[in-house]
Every structure is written in structure tokens, then in C-alpha cells.
Amino acid sequence: MSKPVLGAALSIKSIPAHRDWLLERQRDLEIQDFFRADLLDGDWRSAASEIKQMLSGHTGRLGIHGPFWGFKIDSHDPMIRQAVTKRLLQGLDAAEFLGATQMVIHSPFTTWDHNNLDLYPDNRGNLVERVKATLAEVIARAETIGCEVVIENIEDRDPRDRVRLAKALESAKVRVSLDTGHANYAHISTGAPPVDYYVETAGDMLTHVHLQDTDGFADRHWAPGEGNIPWVAVFRAIGRLTSNPRLILELRNHDEVRTGAAHLAALGLAE
């Protein structure tokens, strides 16, 4: 049985060092430059053009991490929602220019929400409506350019929340992402289920995974093997999916991407 091929999250600065590794198996790549507001408001096309030249010959699946700093996608304030919509549309502009077919955005669910969202009967429905108001134009654009939007868990304590949200947005171009380190933090620090439960709960709505290890206390973005995530259980759950999620090593130190990949390969889980 073939093993999944690992990809990585890299930036314009770190792509050159890993170019050969990417091309040898045509690995999936997530570009991590176009969530920056200063770049999106500046000459992002020059940066994107430089990246396209760097990736000459790369035929793996390409994605970007979309904007997320300083906002949530469920803001109560219509003026803020307009700003969020604009930022995410800027991200999709960059995705289209690059030929990227996936953009990561952040889940709105907080640890506070887990205890308080059901305090009033309309809260969940109202949250969905606010997200729809924020993302309506974004989803329409994503559908037009063929770019999937995936919602990544951040503080999510209940892995079902963002899966239900993604389904409520009623688009084939909206799916979910799993960040293994965020899930492990939520498990150990806030009482969420273990990481493999996040995979099982998402099922084939899961089309993107950030692979990073943690101690469950903070968002470490360590290479797999440095923390306490049970990787065998995680990959066993991934192996039951038919959605073929992109498996992206998202590490704080991009120099350790191949070290992390080697650890998972040594466990017999991936290539």
C-alpha cells in the first residue's frame, strides 16, 4: 500500500533550500507569504512572480495561507466584516496569480465559545449568518477561480464546530483544515479530544493538514518527533480518508522540514 507523500509550508526565503526536495516527488506546497497585510497592500505581484520562477517545473498541488492577523471571520461589526472580506479577496487574488488551488483561513471558534455559545438558542445560527455575510463574496470568487477555501482549527475545542460551519456554507469549494499542533494544544490544555479524533470527525471534509508537533501547552510548530503527538494514530485516521488531504509540514524553523519528514518516514507513515 502506498504511503502519503509529505509537502511543506514555505516562504519566498525558504523555498530555494527545499526546491529539489519538492520537485523530487512533486510534493504539495503551501506558500506562507500572502497572509501579510503589508505585502498584500504592497507589490505582492513582484513577490509572486519571483516565487513562480522559483517553482519552475513544480507540478505538485499549490496553496497559500490566507490572511488572518487581526480579525475573525464572524465579526459582529459590519464595517469589520467588510475589511475581512477585502483582505480575503486580496489573498485569492494572489492565489489566482500563482495558480494556487487552496487557501487556508482560520476558524472563528474560541475556547470561550465552547462554554458560552449555547447560552442563548440563536447564538450558533447567528454565528453562521455572520460568517456567511463575511465570506459570501469570497466563496463566489473562490468558486470562479477554482480555489478551495479550507477552515483551520485554532482554539476549537469541539472538532465538530467548524465541520458543521463548513457544511453550512454550502459550497463544494469550502472544506476544513486540521492543524495537528493546535488540536494537541486544545486536547491537553483545554480538554478537547485527541488529535486523531479531529481527523475522524472531519472525515472527507478534511482536505488539508498542517503537520506540526507540540507539547500541548503552546503552539510550538516543532518538527514531528519533538513533541508528544501520537503520529501513528493520526496517520491511521488519515489513511481511512478518501479526500486525499494535502499533508503540509508547517514548522517554525523551515530548516527542519526534512528532519520532520524523515521522522515520519522512519515511523513508516509517509514519504
Image: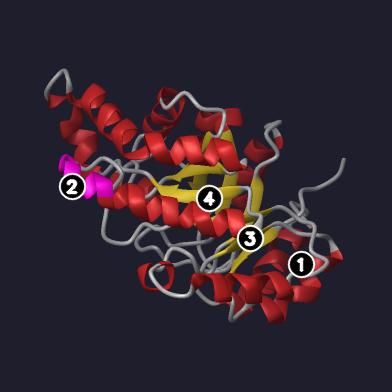
Check disc 4 and report the residue beneath it.
103
**Apparent side of residue 263 relative to residue 135 in the rendered image (left or right):** right
Check disc 3 and report the residue beneath it.
98
Name the amino acid, label 1.
Leu
Measured as percent of width and height from the top left, residue 47 is found at: 56, 75
Query: Which contiguous range is marked in magenta?
Result: 76-82
CA–CA distance in space, label 3 to label 2:
29 Å
Q: Within the magenta stretch, is there residue 77?
A: yes
Q: Is residue 49 above or below residue 151?
A: below
Check disc 2 and report the residue beneath it.
79
Upstream in the sequence, badge 3 or badge 2? 2
Q: Element at badge 2?
A: helix
Badge 2 crowding class, 10 Å Cα cut-off, few under 14, some 14 to 19, many 20 or more, is few
Badge 4 crowding class, 10 Å Cα cut-off, few under 14, some 14 to 19, many 20 or more, is many
Badge 1 crowding class, 10 Å Cα cut-off, few under 14, some 14 to 19, many 20 or more, is many
Viewer-side residue, 67 vs 209: 67
Q: Is residue 208 visible in this depiction of the protein?
A: yes
Which residue appears at 47% of the width and 56% of the height? 91
Check disc 1 and report the residue beneath it.
22
